[in-house]
Image (cartoon, rainbow, N blue to C red):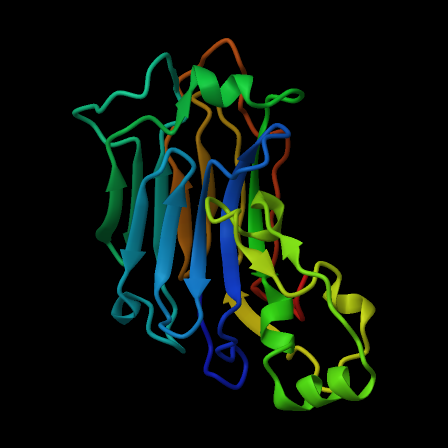
Amino acid sequence: MLIPSEQDFPDLRPITTVINQVKFGNKSLPIWQTQFTSGKGEIIVELETGALCVIDPKYFPRNQWLEIEIHVDYVVEPEFTESLHPYFNYIVNGKTLCSSYFPVMTNRTVSDSSSGNNLFFKWGIYDAWVSDWLTEQEINKRWLNENKIVLTGYGGDAHTGGGRSSSRVSKVGNPFDYDWPTKLPTRKLYYTDWKIADTERVWVRLVLSGLRIILIPYRLTPVSYAPKQCLSGERGVQEASGS
């Protein structure tokens, strides 16, 4: 992965940007996710179980290709009990920056999904709380006042990128229904070629030249989590103007 300069990936504080995440069934909260925090440039790794790592931005220099590995053991444990082996490792350029020795999946995790039992790996860019940035722009403030527009706050949930901060209230729940004078700028993140391969041991491996993401093999349980597809693509760019 490559995080470009401010020109292509401007800092839009207080927006939170989800880079990637894994979701299970129709469970609202991601099993785990990584976020770029505006203002500081830190990467936050957050697990649904409560584990949280804030990684110093020095490990994510801009305009440099990064090799990333994410090792996750999705075995469904009966209890949320600490183990001697890590269930989750986040590795950048060969250095382990975040580990969790607690299960990523438990019986409660499975029961929280009322339908579906598949894991879904998702890529960003996904920007949350965009209305907070839009309403802080001076030209937009004047436009709201001149047009006597009153905004209704919106209580965030996991789908808005709020994660465990779901009590947060954004300025408005439908920001793209308004023709803001100052628009949300387009931002870019660069990824190299990536693939998902399903094998007998249920390895999931995303191989990217420059970026390599690996999820360790699942231990087979009564619920099957094997990916249903193999994907590949050329080196490219993810763009977003907010969602």
Pick out the residue farthest to the left.
84
Tell me if 168 is positioned left or right of 213 in this view: right
- Judging depth in this view, the residue of 166 and 94 nearest the camera is 166
Pick out the residue farthest to the top.
222
Please state, as top left, top right, bottom left or bottom right, where the N terminus lies in the image: bottom left
Residue 84 percent across, percent down from the top left: 16, 25
Please state, as top left, top right, bottom left or bottom right, where the C terminus lies in the image: bottom right
- Judging depth in this view, the residue of 196 and 129 nearest the camera is 129
Residue 71 percent across, percent down from the top left: 34, 38
Residue 186 visible (yes or no): no
The residue drawn where x is 24% and y is 52% is 97
Residue 107 visible (yes or no): yes
Identify whether 140 is placed above or below 239. Answer: below
The quarter holding residue 23 reads top right
The quarter holding residue 228 reads top right
The residue drawn where x is 32% and y is 21% is 80
Residue 68 percent across, percent down from the top left: 36, 54
Tell me if 73 is positioned left or right of 175 in this view: left
- Judging depth in this view, the residue of 71 and 187 nearest the camera is 187
* Total numbered circles: 0
Tell me if 187 is positioned left or right of 96 in this view: right
The residue drawn where x is 50% and y is 51% is 20
- Judging depth in this view, the residue of 64 and 24 nearest the camera is 24
The residue drawn where x is 24% and y is 31% is 101
Identify whether 220 is placed above or below 217. Answer: above
Residue 99 percent across, percent down from the top left: 25, 41
